[in-house]
Image (cartoon, rainbow, N blue to C red):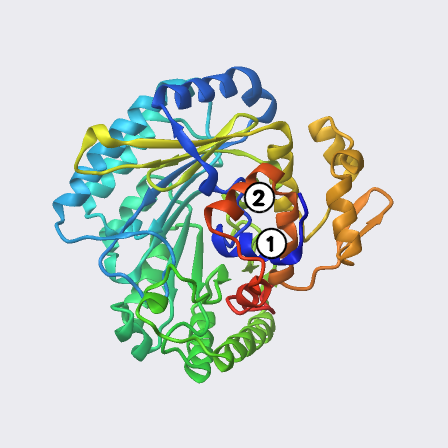
Amino acid sequence: MEINLNKLAFICLHTSWWNIYPPQDIARNISKSIVSKNWKNYIENDYFIHKKLWFYLHTPFCESKCLFCSCWSEKVVWWTTLDIYISRIIKEFTYFSAIFSNIKLNHAYFWWWTPSIYNTEQLKKILSSIRKLYSFEEKAQWNFEISPHTMTEEKVKILKNYWVSRVTIWIQTMTLESLRVNGRFQTWDKLENIFSWIRKYWIENINIDLMPWIPWENLKNFLLNLRRIIQMNPDMIHLYPFRPSEDTLFYKKWFIYTENDIKNRDLMYELWVKLIEKYWYYWVENDSWWKNDSARNEQEVDKIINNCSILWFWYPTRSYIHKNLMYFTWYDMYNESNTVYMWIKLETKDYISRYIISHFRDGFDIKILNEKFWIDFLELYKFEIKFLEVNNILEIRGNYFKTKINNVFEKLLFSKIFYSEENIKVILDKFSYNEDKDYVKEFKDTLSIVYK
């Protein structure tokens, strides 16, 4: 199949804008018993060679939906919804736990969108169930994401009691007008209290998430907010530039993100980098800016560096069984018999491509790759290599694969060359690719092109 830049940009627009491979858009239905069988196969044949597996719990609930959010989540209308969700989740924990009874998982991660939305009893119930059903390595990182207005000192104490070692505070902005428009309720006083509680109970690391130029943000306030946050001395600061994709309420409500907005967002990023580096934060590969080496998100690093397996709960999260399959779930939480498992079978080239895509920008040692997967990289990917060379993106120095990429736009665009021909065809057909349309410009306009 002919591949060109317009097709690659089209794929970027209609799959996850991060380098998640294979894309879930090509998934098919699968039974729960087949999923279980594949996990057992992995544990019996690959785990004790690979020894990389971490646990993830997804919380797809928020008190309100922010304009800038592009991810699927559900607003909590009835608080009994969370009790129903917890009971379903614990059944799912229990169903799979026997498979992993003789191993220790590497890490645990609690994310998307507001894991701190649970009350104290619900939080204890979830964490105690995980501790009861699964074992973890002694130095496992337990990473918990919180939204400030949903936290109390008692909740922080519970997190510490259940071994949480890294807290990500999801604030994105502290500008009053932006908070008001986006339906967020956080205050500086509450944020400072949370820092105090986390340090009081000796939770090791604090990460702050920020998003420049989200709706009703401005340059002056963003930089003032950043200075104040730096003074609070978080261990890591993570930046996610706002992308006004078609999945956001911003887009759905017909707000317009202008060329001037894009320029200001990029300028904000550049100033952000200069300011944060002035205060001794350092860029760490595969993560963001940190002050100490224990602050990084170990799960994300492990996923990239080691192609690790991931046991994710619940919808619409993606579990990855190394060398077997990727699967995810959809379900109607009010109808217990309606859980739907979707899967993508991983061929040999797929799980190798997953590794390459994760390392695409920063490069990798070809000799190590060949030994890791028992392949001849230059032969197996000769078509892809030629394409990158023709577009002046690739240089191979000795045994080292190195790209000439300068920004996230090029990283996302050109990494799609490693999608399988079958996957590319499915995406082009499913989303009705039009060869007369300029998808390269459309995709570029959704990104901060100076974002590292």
Residue visible at 79% across and 55% down in the picture = 390
Q: Residue at x 12, y 44 (%)?
A: 80
In the rendered picture of this protein, how many numbered marks are placed on residues? 2
Q: Amino acid at mark 1?
A: Lys
Mark 2 neighbour density, 10 Å: few (under 14) some (14–19) many (20 or more):
many
Instruction: State which quarter of the image contains the N terminus.
Output: top right
Q: Where 89 sits versus 429, above or below?
A: above
Locate residue 247 relative to residue 403 in the image: left or right.
Answer: left
State whether residue 374 appears in this view.
yes
**Is the C-beta separation of discs 2 and 1 under 8 Å?**
yes
As drawn, is 251 to the left or to the right of 284?
left
Task: Report how far apart the C-alphas of labels 2 and 1 lie in the structure.
Answer: 9 Å
Residue drawn 65% across the image and 60% down it: 410
| Quadrant (top left, top right, bottom left, bottom right) of the C terminus | bottom right
Q: For residue 197, which quarter of the picture?
A: bottom left
Q: Who is closer to the viewer here, 26 or 428?
A: 428
Q: Position of residue 155 (x, y in %)?
A: 25, 50
Residue on which the image places disc 1? 7
Left or right of 268 on screen, residue 399: right
First-in-chain label (2 vs 1): 1
Q: Which disc is residue 424 wearing?
A: 2
View extreme (top): residue: 44
Residue 243 x %, y %: 46, 65
The circle on residue 226 is none
- Residue 365 visible, this orientation: no
